[in-house]
Image (tube, helix red, strand yellow):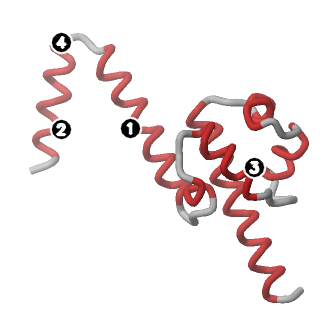
């Protein structure tokens, strides 16, 4: 396999990880993404399984649906940032649902750990 083929395979894997992470973050199914992007569900599945890449138009459409920039879909390591964002969102959601006394306790513990 030539170096450009290896590079393309690597980019497909990065794209697949990032699309999967954005799907989880946005709680969209592959089918919903396909409909919003006006591409086939099979193409989305091929992308998320790194069997194929996608054209620039599909990349821009997916980025638009996810509310990100197209480069973020092919940026290595982006899935870690997305995962961090998901955990933070869950924590904020839990905090907002907690009682006022529990929120005070959480703030007290957080202030001690950030000193």
Q: Is residue 105 left or right of residue 88?
A: left
Residue 20: percent from left, percent from top: 68, 46
Q: Quick one: label 1, few (<14), some, or many (20+) residues within 10 Å?
A: few
Q: Callout 2: 10 Å neighbours few (<14), some, many (20+)?
A: few
- Which one is earlier in the sequence, the residue at label 4 or at label 3? 3
Q: Which residue is mark 2?
A: 110
Helix, strand or loop status at disc 4: helix
22 left or right, relative to 88 = right
Location of the N terminus by quadrant is bottom right
Quarter of the image for residue 14 reads bottom right
Q: Quadrant of residue 15?
A: bottom right
- 85 above or below 53? above
Quickly name the residue at label 1: 88
Q: Residue at x 34, y 28 (%)?
A: 92
Tell me whether circle 1 and circle 4 mark residues in contact (CB < 8 Å).
Answer: no
Which residue is tagged 3? Answer: 58
Q: Earlier in the sequence, mark 1 or mark 4?
A: 1
- Secondary structure found at label 1: helix
Q: Nearer the viewer, mark 2 or mark 1?
A: 1
Comes first in the chain, label 3 or label 1: 3
| Distance of label 3 from label 1 (alpha carbons) | 29 Å
* Vertical order, 52 against 65 (above or below): below
Pick whichever, 93 or 60, lies toward us.
60
Depth-wise, is mark 4 or mark 3 nearer the camera? 3
* Residue labelled with disc 4: 100
- Check if mark 4's residue and mark 2's residue have beta carbons within 8 Å: no
- The spot of residue 26 in percent (x, y) is 58, 32
């Amino acid at each position: 396999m030539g170096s450009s083929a290896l590079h393309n395979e690597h980019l497909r894997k990065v794209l697949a990880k990032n699309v999967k992470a954005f799907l989880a973050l946005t709680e969209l199914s592959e089918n919903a993404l396909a409909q919003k992007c006006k591409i086939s569900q099979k193409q989305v599945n091929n992308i998320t399984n790194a069997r194929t890449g996608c054209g620039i138009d599909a990349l821009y459409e997916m980025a638009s649906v996810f509310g990100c920039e197209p480069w973020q879909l092919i940026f290595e390591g982006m899935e870690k940032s997305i995962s961090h964002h998901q955990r933070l969102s869950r924590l904020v959601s839990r905090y907002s649902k907690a009682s006022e006394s529990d929120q005070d306790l959480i703030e007290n513990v957080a202030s001690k750990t950030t000193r």
